[in-house]
Image (cartoon, grey):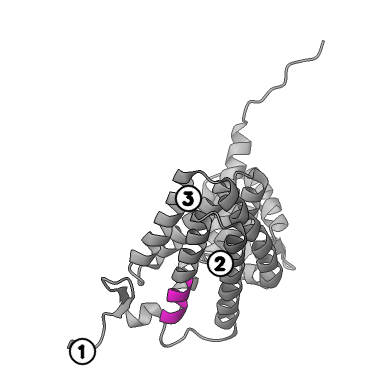
Amino acid sequence: MRQPLSLKIEARESSSTLAYERLRQAIIRGEFQPGERLTEVTTAGMLGVSRTPVREAFARLTMDGLMRAAESGGMEVVDPQQELADIYHIREAVEGCAARLAAMRGSTAELDQILALASASRRTDRVDVKTRARLNDEFHMAVAKAGHAPRVERLVSDYHELFATPRVLRRYTVEETETAIRDHEAIARAIHARDSDGAERAVRDHLRRAYAVLLKLEQGPAPANDVAAKGVRPSRSGRPKATTGRRK
């Protein structure tokens, strides 16, 4: 007689997942520098777990392309931007599909939420990069969820957090920030109108522009007229308004 399957979650597996998620976020947020060497012992100490879940987390991060074996032993952090082009091509295809499906399958409540998130981005202080990054994540994931395609949603989740981090958004110029906000509004309007072709096109255009900005940032120093430096805040009309300089 067949023995019943055991679906009990082992504590070690839970620790492994938590270790993976925390290390992944730390790498993406830039808390570890590209090339920084990590060992199982030191990382286990940082996380307060044993070496086994750290070893398993390292293996998963290696598969993600975020870590690799170091020549001197242990593991080293890989700059996620090294795979930038390939990842952006994947994002464009997957998120374009997600937007198309959202326009076709999303409920009225889901489409209203997408519009609300785009509006929230418009109202958010341009200097508040943490909130802007969070809203960006929520917007892209709301579009993916509205498509009711779990496989597509998982693919979107794998890549969306790699780029619009507070560190990156802090270096956007005023114009680049406004373009990204307008892009989200265009995506939301197309999805809300059930325009599947327009929704996919708007997402693809948005990601191509975001890719171009990121390439520019990787090729040179932070621009002198970035949002954080100029202290740009939204005016009542929703357009950017500088808060520094002489008052009139």
Q: Position of residue 236 (x, y in %)?
A: 26, 71
Q: Which mark is residue 111?
A: 3
Query: Is residue 154 toward the left or the right of residue 26 in the image?
Result: right
Q: Which mark is residue 163?
A: 2
Q: Residue furthest top?
A: 1
Q: Position of residue 89 (x, y in %)?
A: 69, 67
Is tag 3's residue or tag 2's residue first in the polypeptide sequence? 3
Task: Say if residue 173 shows up in the picture.
Answer: no
Tell me the amino acid under the disc marked 1: Arg
Is tag 1's residue or tag 2's residue first in the polypeptide sequence? 2
Q: Name the residue at 44% across, 44% down.
A: 109
Cα distance between the residues tagged 3 and 2: 24 Å
Question: Is 127 located above or below residue 107 in the figure?
Answer: below
Q: Nearer the viewer, residue 43 or 28?
A: 28
Question: Is 206 located above or below residue 144 in the figure?
Answer: below
Query: Is residue 133 toward the left or the right of residue 141 in the image?
Result: left
Helix, strand or loop at disc 3? Answer: helix
Q: Nearer the viewer, residue 4 or 214?
A: 214
Q: Position of residue 61 (x, y in %)?
A: 67, 55
Helix, strand or loop at disc 2? Answer: loop
